[in-house]
Amino acid sequence: MSGQTLLSVKDLSVAFTQGGKETLAVDRISFDIMKGETVAIVGESGSGKSVSALSVLKLLPYPAASHPTGKILMEGRDLLHASDAELREARGNVVSMIFQEPMTSLNPLHTVEKQISEILKIHRGMSDTAARERVLELLNQVGIRDPEKRLSSYPHQLSGGQRQRVMIAMALANEPDLLIADEPTTALDVTVQAQILELLKDLQRKHGMAMLFITHDLGIVEKFADRVCVMTAGKIVEQGPVAQIFSDPRHEYTRHLLAAEPKGDPPATDKNKPIVVQAENLKVWFPVKRGLMRKTVDHIKAVDGIDITVREGQTLGIVGESGSGKTTLGLAILRMISSEGRIAFNSKDIQGNSWKEMRPLRRDMQIVFQDPFGALSPRMSVADIVGEGLLVHFPHLSADERDRKVASALEEVGLDASTRHRYPHEFSGGQRQRISIARAMVLEPKFVMLDEPTSALDMSVQAQVVDLLRDLQKAHGLAYLFISHDLKVVRALANEVVVMRQGKVVESGPAEQIFDAPQTDYTRALMAAAFRLETAPEGVVNV
């Protein structure tokens, strides 16, 4: 660090106006970032972290959002009152940003190459050839395997972690002075998370880049940041050097955050419990077509001959790096994508069921998606989103009965039921994930596929959701297929674990065995990255 101030935020307030009512989301916060320094802002979802970060580049929806007070000085220039031309010059060149939800930030109509090279051509005037070389270099840096093959890919053809890495490559393209990273490792598995953080640190040392890091993961903050600001209810309640805050927290809220982590034990393994879902020799192969006649020349073996069993009241955890086939496996079991092999639900073979025959089973087979913003309709209120399944599967319910069930489901996942008439964009990322969980649980299903359900949640809410899922499972005998890269959460919930890599099972067995005595180098690398946040062995994380 040079000791020279790069960014200075002074008395910043952010207010949102709706229906004539003004709500203060950020209340007179102040902090500085020195050149080459990493400052983290931590706090629970809805505390104002992302709103504060978005204010730096004036990316909030004006005029609904306003700044009653404050200045944002970038090397002495007030960005809060800058002209559009000045902001265009600053965005990308001086300050760049990695957003929390890559699927909604990437253009679905443009290839990876076009989206990254567009930045280079606009800001640096690069030719097509030079831009292509730089794009390949960036994709290599952020750990995309076979980047040449990914240049022509569209966002929907990438896994959640791969999309996040493309976002990181775009943000780093012009080597900005300040990188604002809003939950940049949320969608990444633990080994790639360690690699990306090390990459950011290397780039920071090389270019003297400063970082404003927004996260709910205190483990990352402790290893990665120089200073930390703790936010709650729109205010910074404590800030200082990371070592000081972690060793001697002064504010009660800071102590609450540091103490919060998923606790408790998963259900005891019981082989006598009835089998709810079973898959045998399951395969999902995607054809690779080339040439004028679009002939199949190869296959991407996303799921390659996997057997799984999920019993009543039990949780099967599926872990592995992004792109390993975890989500594809879950979607195949739910018959949401085509597959080969046997799939049975409640001892009945459903692989041959038509879409119409599957519809009555959807009530008992629910899913919570990884990306809550992409999974929630922006045109529907939360009450309509959560209650939609009730309309389909419980048409006899009156409007009042349906509304009571919706309110109860929202309260179960820690949301204020009085907010149910709002829309998804009015909630933070963590709150949207809880809405997704409520939508699945309101139908009282027998089997739930949970695809990274806690990835967008802060630590304290993660613990609450884990407790909630465990309580629901115990009360109703729910069977969970729990897909996650957060091994601490998996350890708290799953009694059986399957480790996947490149579409195959690397290791499987009781959770205690997998966590305490892993048998393969790959599983040991995952555990090392998860519980010590160390860089995994070379070759393991480049996915």
Image: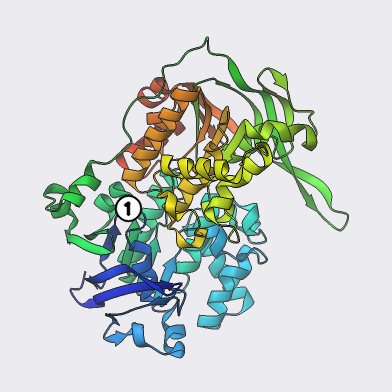
Residue 271 image offset from top left, x and y in percent? 51, 11
Residue type, label 1: Glu
Secondary structure under the numbered disc 1 in the rendered image: loop
The residue where tag 1 is placed is: 44
Q: Is 35 located above or below residue 357 in the figure?
A: below
Asked if 410 appears above or below 263 in the picture, the reply is: below
Locate residue 370 relative to residue 65 in the image: left or right.
right
Q: Quadrant of residue 183?
A: bottom left
Residue found farthest to the top: 272
Going 46% across and 45% down the picture, which residue do you hit?
410
Q: Quadrant of the N terminus?
A: bottom left
Residue drawn at x 20%, y 77% as measured from the top left: 4
Q: Residue at x 42, y 39 (%)?
A: 412
Tell whether 174 sits left or right of 299. Answer: left
Q: Position of residue 436 (x, y in %)?
A: 52, 46
Which x, y percent locates residue 484?
47, 39
Q: Quadrant of residue 57?
A: bottom left
Is residue 520 found left or right of 235 in the rendered image? right
- Is residue 414 visible to the viewer in this orientation of the structure? yes
Q: Is residue 368 visible?
A: no
| Nearer-the-camera pick, 341 or 423 | 423
Q: Residues within 10 Å of mark 1 (few under 14, many from 20)?
A: many
- The correct choice, above or below, for 269 with respect to 17 in the image is above
Relative vertical location of residue 536 with respect to residue 103 in this rendering, above or below: above
